[in-house]
Amino acid sequence: MQLIDTHTHIFLPEFDDDRDQVIKNAQENGISQILLPNVDHTTTTSLLKLADKYPDFCLPMMGLHPTSVDENYQKELKKVEDWLAKRKFYAIGEIGIDLYWDKTYKSQQEDAFLHQINLAKKYNLPIVIHARESFDEIFKIVEKEMDDNLTGVFHAFTGNEKQADQIVDWGFKIGIGGIVTFKNAGLDKVVSNIDINHIVLETDSPYLAPVPKRGKRNESAYIIYIAQKIAEIKNIAIEEVARITTNNAQQLFRL
C-alpha cells in the first residue's frame, strides 16, 4: 500500500532532533513521497537541504505563505522568483490568503497570491492554496485567473459542500488532513459528498495531528489515520483510498 503526503513541513525546527527518524517512520508506513511547501525565505535553506538529502522522496515547492506577507512582501516574492529560475520545484506553494490571524495586509496578500498564480502559469506548475477565513477572496481571484494552465489543490480544506463543488468544477483537488478525524469538525459530512477522485491526503505536519494522535506533534506516518477515516466515510477498503489518492497526487504534481 502506497501513500503520498502532499503537504508536510518537516523541515521546520520542530523536527530538528529526529527528522531522519520521522522520515524512516513515514517510509515504514508505506509513504512513498512527501511534498514540502515553503513558508518564506527563512525556511528555504532547511527545506532545500532536506529535499537534496532525500531526492525523489522529499519534493520541494516554492512560494510565499500568506502569513509571511507584510510591507516587504515584494522582496520575498523576488526571492521566490530567483529560486524558481534556479532549480526544479513541484508546485508553487504554499500560497493564498489568511484572514484568521491578521487582516492588516489583506490587499498585499491578495497581490502576492495573484503574482504567484502568474508564476505558476509561467512555470507550468500547480498551486497549493492556503485558505483561512478567506474563501470568498480566494475564489474571486481564482475565478478571474482560471484557464487551462491553472491547476492545484486547496490544502487543509475546511470549507462547505458548495465550496467543495466549486473547487471540483475548476478541476482542482481537495487536500484532506487530520481535521477529518476530529469529532465535531463536521468535515466528515462534507467529505462523504466529495468524489474520492478529487481528494489528496496530507498531514500538514507538525500541525493538526489526527485522532488518535490529536494534540501531539504531527508527522507524515500519521497519514494512515486520515486514510483510515476516509475509508470509513466512503465505506471502501483503505487500500482503495491509498490507490486513488496516490494516483490523484501523482497526476496533480506530475510525479
Image: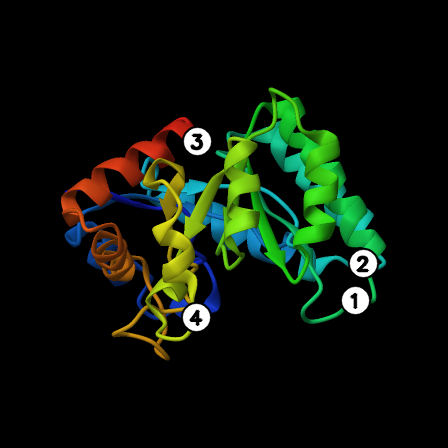
Judging by the rendered image, the residue that carries numbered circle 1 is 103
Categorize mark 3 by other alpha carbons within 10 Å: few (<14), some (14-19), many (20+): many
* Element on which disc 1 rests: loop
Whether pointer 3 and pointer 2 mark residues with C-beta atoms closer than 8 Å, the reply is no
Viewer-closest of 180 and 88: 180
Residue at position x 41%, y 49% from top?
Answer: 50
The answer for how far apart the CA atoms under marks 2 and 1 are is 5 Å
**Rendered image quadrant of residue 199:** top left
Say which label, 3 or 2, has the lower sequence index.
Answer: 2
Q: Amino acid at mark 1?
A: Lys
- Position of residue 45 in the picture relative to residue 41 (left or right): left
Residue shown at the point (54%, 57%) measured from the top left: 159
Which residue, given by chain and number where applicable, does mark 4 sit on?
185
Q: CA distance from mark 2 to mark 4?
A: 27 Å
Q: Report x, y in % for residue 95.
A: 63, 48
In the rendered structure, which amino acid carries the disc numbered 2?
A: Lys
Q: Which label number is shown at residue 252?
A: 3
